Each structure stands twice: as structure tokens, then as C-alpha cells.
Amino acid sequence: MNTRDLAYFAALVDLKNYTAVAARFSVSQPTITVAVKRLEAEFNATLVQRDHAHNTLTITRPGLLLYQRAQLVLKNLDLAHSEVRRADQSTISFGMPPIIGTLWFPLVAGELFSRGLLKYMKTLEVGSGDLLKELQAGKIDVALLGSVRPLQEPGLDATLLAAHEFRAVVSPKHRLAQRGEIEFSELANENFISMTGKFVHPQALRDYSHFAGFRPRVVYSTPNMPLIKALVAADFGVSLLVGDAITPSDQVSSLALSDPVADRFNMSLVVRKKFLPNEIQREFISVLFGLRHHGQSAH
């Protein structure tokens, strides 16, 4: 069976149009028709029903079942191409969100440098949600990911390295600045400055505010954490940030939260279950495991 036939068929189910499928793959329309007929002969089933009078196309139940399986086959085939292509390369395709790159990765960067591993790194720094997709698609091999709960994803091996608590952050001029610990409900009437939606922080903000019984009034969102802290310091609003992000030079007050919300900034080392690292990649991963000994605040 030709895997290209499966690709044509899957596209036909998505587009419901032979001409559109042919255009996508830069082939003739009869090529798509012949591919579908080959699959129907292979599986001894009608996969597509065409109504020429009304110019409509219907995918049969056997066709829908094949479509579901074909998607898995094509996904695994793409992953195989990606992994085999890079199998003998020395490059370490690595991903981490900017906050991990700023706060925790420097703790192991020195050892990576001393072992001569930094020069092999090809790093992608985007939000954890995007990195998760890149990892599953085989576009990166190793990632440090953040999540509000310990990460569990099909096809991935995730090792929890540390769990860091979230804290409310307010201006030193704020009425709550000297409290040390508050309930999140005490911020119900505040303006919030938040991280953008592809990061872990917005999920934590939703969970804390849901527990506290209010909808946060977000007046500004940005991926730039230094900007968030500067705006909070200037008393333009309050925020919810991972506690390790706050330093004395930020000129903000960091408040513990007494709410029994399970959310933490969970940092996990993640690889695909069937990933076979080469010697350089194995050494790189072993150094990242050292982050388990830094800044652990799980409880």
C-alpha cells in the first residue's frame, strides 16, 4: 500500500473536493481518483460516495474509520522522517519557555558550557503550549516545560524537576503590600496585569480567581515579565507570578496565597517516549536533571 495514497485520502476527507486535493499536492485530479480506488481495492470497501448530479461527496463509515487510522500512520511517518533525518546529527534540538530560560536554565548553563555542550544546542524559546506541539511533532527532541499540574501527555515521558509556588504581586504602595499572606479574593476589585495566553500564568490566574469566586479584570497582557513587574511597581495593577521571578530589585511586594489551590509552576523535563538520544543528547539530558536540586519549593 502506498502511504501517499493515504495522504491523498486524508486530505480528501478534510477538503471534500478532488480538485482541491489535487491542487494541494500539485498532481492531476485523476491521480487522486486512482489513489482512492486503490485503497478501496486494498480494504475491499467503499470509502467515498460521489453524487455527480449534485456535485457532492460523502465519506462512508469505513472511510471515516480508515481516515482515523490514516492520521495516526501519517503522523508517525512524519515523526519517523524527522527523527531519522537528525539521527546522526550532533545538534540538540531543545525547547524552553522564556521564563525557564531566564530563571532556571542559567543554573545548569555553566555545567553545559564546561562539558562543551552549549555549542550543540539549537534552542526554541516560546510558550509551553507551543513547545508541547513541537515536541509531539518531532521538531524538537528535548524540552523544559511549565504546567500548572504535573504534566501527563500521551506519547511523552515527563519528569517533574521542581514545583514553584505562585504569589500575588503588588506595588509597595498597595494597601496589602505589608500583609505577607492574603486570600486571593482580596484582589477581586483590582486591575490585573497578566502574562499572555500561551503561558502557564494565565491558567493559574483563572484557577485562583475561580476558587475565589470572581472574574479577574485584566487590563493588560504581555509576554514580557520585566514589563509586568515595572507596571505593578508603578501601581497600575496587580499580578500573579511565579515566586522565583521576584527579586529585591523589582521594587514590588510578593504575597503568599493562603487559598488551597493546587496550581504550581511545575517544571518538567520532557522527551518523546520512543526517542533514542545519541551520546551528546544523553549527556545534555543528564545535566538538565540537575535542576531537581535547584530552587525546589514543592509542598
Image (cartoon, rainbow, N blue to C red):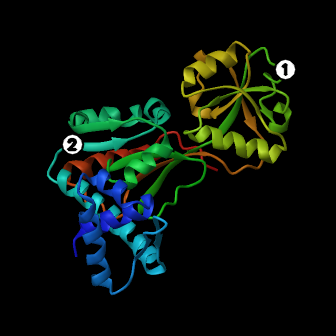
Determine crowd level at label 1: few under 14, some 14-19, many 20+ residues with C-alpha closer than 10 A.
Answer: few
Q: Is residue 238 above or below residue 139?
A: above
Residue at (59% x, 33% y) in the render: 196
Q: Left or right of 40: which side holds 225?
A: right
Element at label 1: loop
Label 1 belongs to which residue? 175
Kindly identify which numbered label has been placed on residue 145.
none
Looking at marks 2 and 1 on the same chain, the residue that comes earlier in the sequence is marked by 2
* Residue at point 28%, 60% (across, down): 29
Residue at 36% over, 70% down: 70
Which residue is nearer to you in this view: 190 or 295?
A: 190
On the image, the x and y values in percent for residue 224 come to: 54, 24
Instruction: Give the vertical position of 52 relative to 188 (above or below).
Output: below
Q: Looking at numbered disc 2 in the image, what kind of residue is underneath it?
A: Thr
Residue 108, placed above or below residue 1: above
Residue 151 location, x and y as percent? 52, 55
Residue receiving disc 2: 91
Q: Is residue 18 left or right of residue 189?
A: left
- The residue sitting at the front extreme is 53
Callout 2 secondary element = loop
Q: Nearer the viewer, residue 272 or 16?
A: 16
Cα–Cα gap, marks 2 and 1: 51 Å
